[in-house]
Image: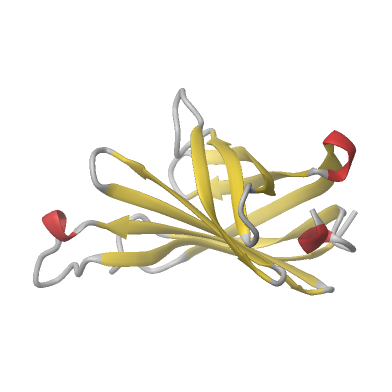
Amino acid sequence: MDAFAGHTGSWTGTNGFRLMPDDPLQDAPAGAVVRGAAGGHLTEIAYTWSHPQDGEQDGLLVLGAGEAPGTVVGLWGDSWHQKPEPRVLSGTSAGRVLTVSCTYAGDWGWQVVVDASDPEVLHLSMHNVIPASAATDTMRAGPYPAMWAPLRRGA
């Protein structure tokens, strides 16, 4: 995919993780390897991160252009977030920022954002989306960042 031109290779840094919106982000090492696949029609992002209690985790995000201009489709699997089935994602691209989402557990949602707009940084973020049906006075409906990983070129 054109959005990742210049971003193939290895990336390292940290991820901030939190389970609930009021929890502080807990930092841990993270990394990713970005590569083209299927003749350049797909992009694979294989990533690693660490959960504060459950330790090292890994995931795979495969992205490609959708049928309509500006749309993106993907397949996402993560050793902590989805067990055992992967999720099919759909969304949009705005330049080098891709946003894809899916639902789980009824009307809860995940939103994954890959920002390749900076040639020196690959931003991966995952947002849990609280449905209106689960919102409270202290936990409002909508997305909140559950994981944030700004990654830089690495070995």
Q: Position of residue 154 (x, y in %)?
A: 86, 59
- Work out which residue is located at the far bottom of the displayed protein and give it: 118
Above or below for 148 versus 75: below
Q: Residue furthest top?
A: 84
9 above or below 96? above
In percent of width and height, residue 74 lies at 60, 43
Q: State the image coordinates of residue 139 (x, y, percent, origin top left).
A: 18, 67
Tell me residue 102's x, y (percent): 42, 46
- Relative to the observer, which residue lies in front, 107 or 125? 107
Residue 35, image quadrant: top right
Left or right: 9, with 83 as reference point: right
**For the point 47% across and 37% down, which residue is it?**
80
Front residue of 16/134: it is: 134
41 and 112: which is toward the camera: 41
Relative to 32, does residue 81 appear above or below in the rendering?
Answer: above
- Relative placement, left or right, of 126 versus 142 is right
Query: Residue pushed farthest left?
Result: 137
Q: Is residue 132 left or right of residue 111?
A: left
Q: Splitting the image into 4 quarters, where does residue 14 fall?
A: bottom right
Residue at position x 35%, y 44% in the image: 103
Which residue: 38% across, 69% down? 24
